Amino acid sequence: MKRIALLVMLMLALTVSAAFAETLTVNIWDNNQRAGIQQICDEWSATSGIDVKVDVIDWDNYWTLLSAGASGGTLPDVFWMHSNTAQMYMDYDLLLDLTDYVAADDAINLDDYYQGIVDLYTRDSDGKVFALPKDHDTIALLWNKAIFDQYGVEYPTDNWTWEDMYEAAKQITEKSEGNVYGMAMNTSNNQDGWYNLIYDYGGNVVSDTHDSTAIDSEGAKAGMEMMRKLLTVGAPQTVVAETGTENLFKSAKTAMISQGSWMINNFYTAENHEDYFWALLPYADVNGNGQADDGERWSCYNGLGWAAAFNTANPDAAYSLISWLCAKEQQIKQAELGVTMAGMPGVSEAFANAFPGMDISAFLAAEDFNLYMRPYTKMTTVWEDPIQQAGGFLDAWQNPEDPAIMEKACDNAAAIIRDAIAQGY
C-alpha cells in the first residue's frame, strides 16, 4: 500500500513540477557510462513524461562546477556522489534528504545493497540518507598476451603472488632492454593500485570506523616495500605522470597494469583488445604456504551514490528518477548493458557477459575473497592529496631504489592522516 501511495504522491508532484521544468539535468563524470545511463533514464522518461539530459563532465571540472553550484550557482538536479566528498556535502545539507522517500518506497530496501556503500551515504549524526547506492567496483590485473609471448614470459594466473608479478615484470623490462616496461602503476589512483598491497600485507589506510590509521604498521610497510620493488622494474613515475598507465598499456609500452571495473569498456573497445586479458590481483603469501588464505588477497571497492540537489526545483521527480536507477531491475539492466556492476550483491552476473570475447570474470571472482571499502573520512581529500605529494609518498615513488625513503613515507603519511582525523576531517 505504501508503494501505491508513494506512486500517487509522485505522479501528483510530477504533474505540478512538470509545469516548472520538463527536463531533469543529470551530471556524471564517466563518458563510458553515459549511453547506458541515458537509455535507463529514457525508460523512466517514458513513464513519467519528464525528459532527462545526462551530461558528462570530466572529473576535475565536475567537482569544481558542483562546488560552484553549492556556493550559490545552479546545481544539477541529480548527480553522482563519491566517497571523497560525500561526508562534507551531507554535513552541509547540500544534498536532498532522501530519508522519508526511502521509508515510503517499497522498491528500495537499504538492506539489499552493499552495507559499506549504504553507510557512506548515511549521515552518522542523525541516520539520514542522502544518496542511494548506484554501483560497486572491484580491481583486477590487466595484461598484454602479445608482450608476454614476445619475451617468453609465463602468463599471469589467478594464483600469482606479488612476488610473481615482480619477477615477471623484471624479466620483461630486462629482456626488452627497457623498451617495454614489465608493469606500470598509476600511483595517483590509489584505489586500483597501491592501497591493495597495504591491505594484503595486513595494514590499512583508514580503519573501518574512520577514526584511525595503520598505514605505518609493520604489515603496511611490508606492502609498501613490495610496492617499492615493483616500481624498480616498472615504468618510472616521470613517464607515468607524462603518459598515463592507460596510454602506456594501449601503446604496448607496458605489459601489466591494475585497473578498476569501471575501465573495462575503455580497453574492450581499444584497437588491440584481442591481446588484453584480465586476472585476479596478486596476493601476499604472508604465511608462506603457497596459497591465498583469508586476509592475504584484498580488492578495494567503492560505490557511487545517486544524489539530488538540496534545492532542486523538482525534488519528487528527482527522487523518482533515483529510485528508478537504484531499483533491482535497473541495477541488473546496468550490468547487462556493461555500464558497471550493481550496488547490490548477487545481481552482477550479467556484467560478465556484457563484453563478448573478453573474459572479465576476475572482477566478479574478486568478491569471493576480501573486499574493503575505499578508505574515507569526513573530508578525505584533506589527507589523501598530501600523502601522495612531496613529504609523503611522492618522494618514494620517484626514488624507488631506496627502501628507507618508502619506510619514512609510511610514517609521514600516518602523521598526516592522524592530524586530519584529530582536526575533524
Image (spheres, rainbow, N blue to C red):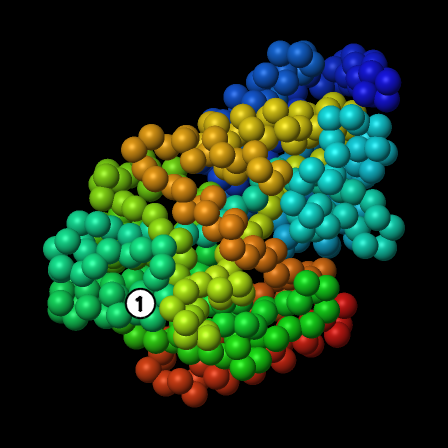
Residue at 53% of width from left, 29% of height from top? 334
Quadrant of image for the N terminus = top right
Q: In which quarter of the image is residue 28?
A: top right
Residue at the outermost front position: 289
Relative vertical location of residue 284 with respect to residue 405 in this rendering, above or below: above
Q: Which of 95 and 299 is in front in this view?
A: 299
How many callouts does the rendering have?
Answer: 1
Quadrant of image for the C terminus = bottom right
Residue 235 visible in the picture: no
Q: Of helix, strand and loop, which one carries label 1? A: helix
Residue at 78% of width from left, 26% of height from top? 106
Coordinates of residue 257 in the picture (x, y in percent): 34, 56
Coordinates of residue 354 in the picture (x, y in percent): 41, 30
Q: Nearer the viewer, residue 73 or 100?
A: 100
Residue at 79% of width from left, 51% of height from top? 123
Q: In which quarter of the image is residue 238?
A: bottom left
> With 223 as the anchor, is 328 left or right in this view?
right
Q: Which of 134 and 329 is in front in this view?
A: 329
Residue 360 visible in the picture: yes
Relative vertical location of residue 273 with respect to residue 408 in this rendering, above or below: above
Q: Name the residue under label 1.
A: 164
Residue at 50% of width from left, 72% of height from top? 201
Coordinates of residue 306 in the picture (x, y in percent): 66, 37
> With 182 as the anchor, is 177 left or right in this view?
left
The local crowd at label 1, few if under 14, some if 14 to 19, many if 20 or more residues have their Cα within 10 Å, is some
Q: Amino acid under label 1?
A: Asp
